[in-house]
Image (cartoon, grey):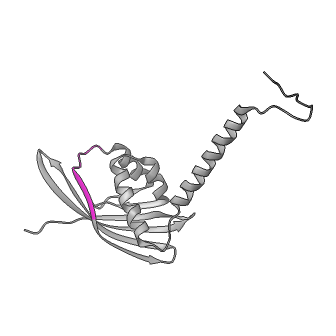
Amino acid sequence: MRRDPITKNERPIDFRHVAIVAVVSSWLMASLVAVAAQRVDKADPQALIQLERSWNEAFYKKDVSFIERVLADEFIAIYEDGSQGDRARELLLTREFNQQVDSARQDGFVVKRYGDTAVVWFTLHLVGPRQGQPVQVDLRYVDVFVWRADRWQCVSSHSTKVEKTP
């Protein structure tokens, strides 16, 4: 086996360091791509509609960390029974949710933007069992968002149960 002499100015290549640099570089590039993909176009109403859909999905999956990013610190909710809640209560309701929902469909979205504020109206159609029978509940929502730190945050949500007319 032939060996080349190493002068005192040259070092042998440590492949562990090369591997570490390659892994760190790959992770950094993937992080930058992920951040770029998360950029939200403030002017695009579809971004708010998608945020509403993702929030709804996160609620049923008990994804508290997602909802923490959506809710502003000063968040206030008015629930369909007229009670009021804040960010802490909304997060608690997410953690403790234990009802069976067979279907949760949102439609009728209307999005209006006013500078760094947006209002989103929509209807949520829920289907699930109550005393062994399938029941549908429809709720109308009005959510108010503000643009902060390059993302929309909800400061207020109001839901009203839609009563069925005979």
Near-viewer residue (103 or 34):
34
Q: In this view, does 118 lie to the left or right of 106?
A: right
Query: Residue at (41%, 49%) from the top-left corner?
Result: 91
Percent coordinates x, y for residue 157 in the rendering? 38, 64
Query: Residue at (60%, 45%) from the top-left corner?
Result: 27
Near-viewer residue (110 or 82):
110
Question: Where is 41 relative to 86, above or below?
Answer: below
Percent coordinates x, y for residue 2 in the rendering? 81, 24
Residue reaching furthest to the left: 166
80 magenta-colored = no
Percent coordinates x, y for residue 62 in the rendering? 37, 46
Percent coordinates x, y for residue 89 in the rendering? 40, 51
Q: Is residue 166 left or right of residue 146?
A: left
Question: Where is 101 relative to 152, above or below?
Answer: above
105 magenta-colored = yes
Q: In which quarter of the image is the C terminus?
A: bottom left
Q: Quadrant of the N terminus?
A: top right
Residue reaching furthest to the right: 8
Query: Residue at (11%, 69%) from the top-left corner?
Result: 165
Part of the protein shown in magenta = 98-106
Near-viewer residue (13 or 78):
13
Quadrant for residue 118, please give it.
bottom left
Number of numbered discs: 0
Near-viewer residue (73 or 36):
36
Query: Residue at (40%, 69%) from the top-left corner?
Result: 46
